Amino acid sequence: MSLEKILSGMQISSSGLSGERLRMEVAANNIANAHTTRTPEGGPYRRQRVSFSSVMDHFAQSGMIDGDKQLGGVKVIGVTSDDSPLPLIYDPGHPDANEDGYVAMPNVTLPHEMVDLVTSSRAYEANLKAMETFKQMAEQALALLQGLR
């Protein structure tokens, strides 16, 4: 058995940790830009979303699941913009108001971002706990092997 197969559980949890970390960063960026009405691209800020793909799904679709393939965890497909409609508020004194006095605001809703932050935080903690459990199991296995000598 190769060392790569022995540590595959750690690699799977590690992919989850990095994916959830990116998700928390994107949610924090969304919250920071909740009132940004002018971006370098023009127009108000659009909410960003992280898309994940299971590496296992990739193998299952290609029919490659067998004993030699490792599952590999999760893969970040990309960060995409949410194209939902932008809310308009009436604020004729705002520098970005149109001729009718309405300002297009970002499509970021704070409760939604907070839910994303909490769920990604919990998933991060779960991956971290899985890594700790794997480490404890490996230490116990090594202790058992040392006792056999």
Image (cartoon, rainbow, N blue to C red):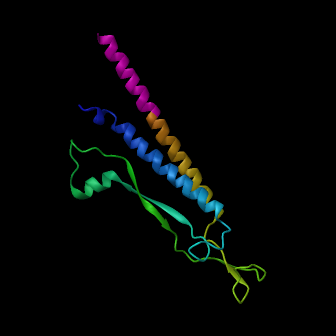
Residue in the picture at 61% in, 67% down = 108
Residue 24, percent across and down?
55, 52
| Front one among 139 and 126 | 139
Above or below 32: residue 127: above
Q: Is residue 148 magenta?
A: yes
Above or below 34: residue 63: above
Residue in the picture at 52% in, 41% down = 125
Residue in the picture at 56% in, 67% down = 47
Q: Which residues are magenta?
A: 132-149
Magenta part, dominant SS: helix
Residue in the picture at 42% in, 29% down = 135
Left or right, 121 with reference to 110: left
Report the quarter where the C terminus lies: top left
Can see residue 112?
no
Left or right, 96 with reference to 65: right
Q: Quadrant of residue 112?
A: bottom right
Above or below 129: residue 97: below
Q: Quadrant of residue 136?
A: top left
Residue 14, percent across and down?
42, 42
Can see residue 113?
yes
Residue 80, percent across and down?
47, 66
Can you name the residue that lies furthest to the front here?
40
Above or below 130: residue 40: below
Can you name the residue that lies furthest to the bottom here?
99
Left or right, 77 with reference to 3: right
